[in-house]
Each structure stands twice: as C-alpha cells, then as structure tokens.
Image: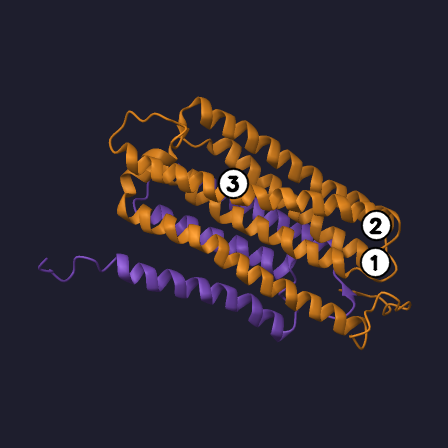
Chain colours: A orange, B purple
C-alpha cells in the first residue's frame, strides 16, 4: 500500500559531504532524533520534579489540580493532535511534490498551533484572576498553600516551556510555508519538512503527558 | 525509509485513535478509581505517544539506528527517574542519629 517515488532527480540540494540524497536525509533524521533525546531530558527534569512532589503531597496536588481548566486543557489536546495529523500529511505532500497541498497543510498546522496559544493565553488569564500565580498573585484558602504553590510552579514551568516550543514551531511552519511557496521543497528535497515534522510531533507528545498529569489529577 | 509514501488513510486512522484515547482518558479522569487513576492515565498517554512516534514520526519502518536513538532518549529519562526516586522513596527507611 505504498506509492513509489522516483529518487530525487536534481541533486543540487545535496551538500558536498554526502554521497547522495538518502545519506543526507538519514544524517538529518539521526541528528533530529539525537536533539529530541536531549529535549526528552530537558522536559524530563520537570516531569521528575512533578513526580517527586506529587508523591510527597498527593492530596494537595489533587486539590491544586482541581483549579486548572480541564475543558481548555482537553480541547487544546485535541487541537494539537489534529495539528500533528496535518503535519504528517504535509510531509507526505512534500514527498509527493504537491506544492499547493504542502503550503495549505503547513499553514493549517501553524493555524491550529496559534489557536492552541490563544486558548493558553485565555487560560493563563483565568489563572491570574483566580489568584493561582505563585509569588505574584497567589491566594489559597485550603490547607497547605505552600504545597499548592509547588504544583502551580510546576504547572507554569511545564506549560510555559511547552508554550515556548509551540511558538517556535508556529514560526518554523510559517517560514517553511513561505519557502514552500517559492518551490523549495517540491523538487524532491523534502527533508526540512520531515525534520520540522519530527519536532512538531515531539511537542505534541509532551502535551499528551502534560494533560493527564496537570489537568486530570484532581477532577475525580 | 527510502522513498515510499504512505496513503493518507494511515494518518487519519491514527488521528481517530488518538482522539478516542483522549476521550477515554478524559472520561476516566472523572471516575474515582483511587490510585489506578494515575496508572490508567499514564498507560493511555504512553499508548498515544507510541502511536504518534510509530505512525506520525515513522519509527515504524525506520532504520534500526533511528529506533535506537529514539529509545535511548526514553532510557536516559528512565535512569534519571529511577535513580532520583530510589532516593526519595527510601528516605526514612533507615533511622539516623543526628
């Protein structure tokens, strides 16, 4: 069930240190996966902190998590999953050298990224008016406000770091859409789209774990 | 690997599976299952992450080198988690005289 594409006929995009397009592509893929491994550990430190403090203060974490907006968190999960699907289709379009489809799919991917960021902004605004921002604006009328503050420190650090990654991804997709418009990736040179796709899917995976840990922990 | 392209059906099916799993984890989030809530939530998250890695990131059908690079990232994370947690979870097991 796969369509064969003839190998890239024009090779001017193969850098001189590579034998051919396939070798250049696999070097790029390996480089990206190594970068993603470092990203796993970058976010991993925060997930580790979350695990330690949740196991120390399970009740306070559940009470604090109850104040997150599970509707926005859940809708944002669906938005990122859909955006990732469009990204996967964009890689396919680039490989099939379908320029028009590629541009629209890249724009669609970044569009849903922007919607995600807008909802995130609405959510942060609600957190601010709900006095859930540690140090700056925090009021807690349940037991152990210190422990609840640890939860919200982690909540803002994790969602904030993730939001920075989404913002980078949005700009990346918009730049790639512009380059696709001048025909950069439909001559057989689809590697940049594929590599950017790996990044976008990784950002999606991080959110897949953030949603249950931050939003669902206290809603039962 | 190489120059073969998948039909779009694979991506839409993966998308549908991911949405179903999201609905499932969201629903279970409102049911009190005690300590099993977090276990089930993490199990579903791992399945979703695997679906994204296998079908969107094309780990399925990729070279062994890429599979290794992808797995190693997770293994390092597990080393970091297990070493730190083996400290935190065993504190107080041995009484110390200060």
Give the image location of residue A2, x and y in percent: 77, 65
Residue under circle 2? A180
Mark 3 near mark 2, Cβ–Cβ under 8 Å?
A: no
The mark nearer the N terminus, 3 or 2, is 3
Tell me which residue sits at (80%, 71%) in the image: A21
Is circle 1 on the same chain as circle 3?
yes
Q: Which residue is mark 3?
A: A160
- Sequence-wise, the earlier of marks 1 and 3 is 1
Q: Is residue A86 left or right of residue B89?
A: right
Horizontal arrangement in the rendering, residue B58 relative to residue A217 (left or right) = right
Is residue A99 positioned above or below B61 on the image? above
Q: Position of residue B36 (x, y in %)?
A: 33, 49
User: CA–CA distance between discs 1 and 3?
Assistant: 36 Å
Question: In terms of sequence position, does the residue under pointer 1 or pointer 2 come before the other?
Answer: 1
User: Where is the C terminus of chain A found, in terms of image quarters?
Assistant: top left
Q: Looking at the figure, which quarter contains the N terminus of chain A? A: bottom right
Front residue of B87 and A70: B87
Tell me the residue that label 1 is attached to: A96
> Alpha carbon of mark 1 to alpha carbon of mark 2: how far?
13 Å
């Amino acid at each position: 069930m796969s369509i064969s594409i003839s190998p890239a006929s024009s090779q001017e995009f193969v850098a001189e240190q590579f034998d051919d397009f396939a070798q250049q592509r696999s070097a790029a893929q390996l480089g990206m996966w190594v970068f993603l491994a470092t990203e796993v550990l970058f976010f991993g430190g925060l997930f580790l902190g979350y695990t330690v403090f949740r196991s120390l203060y399970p009740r306070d974490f559940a009470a604090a998590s109850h104040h997150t907006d599970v509707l926005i968190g859940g809708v944002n999960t669906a938005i990122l999953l859909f955006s990732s699907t469009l990204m996967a289709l964009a890689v396919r379009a680039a490989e099939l050298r379908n320029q028009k489809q590629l541009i629209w799919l890249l724009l669609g991917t970044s569009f849903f990224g922007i919607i995600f960021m807008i909802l995130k902004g609405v959510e942060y605004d609600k957190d601010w008016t709900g006095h859930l921002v540690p140090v700056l604006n925090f009021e807690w009328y349940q037991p152990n406000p210190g422990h609840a503050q640890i939860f919200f420190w982690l909540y803002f650090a994790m969602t904030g770091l993730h939001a920075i990654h989404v913002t980078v991804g949005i700009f990346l997709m918009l730049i790639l859409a512009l380059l696709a418009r001048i025909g950069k990736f439909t001559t057989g040179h689809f590697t940049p789209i594929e590599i950017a796709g790996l990044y976008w899917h990784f950002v999606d995976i991080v959110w897949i774990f953030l949603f249950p840990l931050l939003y669902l922990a206290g809603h039962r | 690997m190489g120059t073969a392209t998948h039909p779009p059906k694979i991506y839409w099916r993966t998308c549908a599976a991911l949405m179903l799993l999201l609905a499932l984890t969201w629903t279970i989030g409102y049911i009190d299952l005690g300590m099993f809530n977090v276990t089930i939530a993490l199990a579903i998250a791992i399945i979703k992450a695997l679906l994204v890695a296998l079908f969107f990131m094309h780990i399925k059908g990729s070279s062994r080198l890429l599979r290794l690079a992808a797995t190693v990232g997770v293994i390092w994370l597990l080393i970091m988690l297990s070493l730190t947690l083996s400290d935190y979870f065993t504190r107080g097991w041995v009484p110390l005289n200060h």
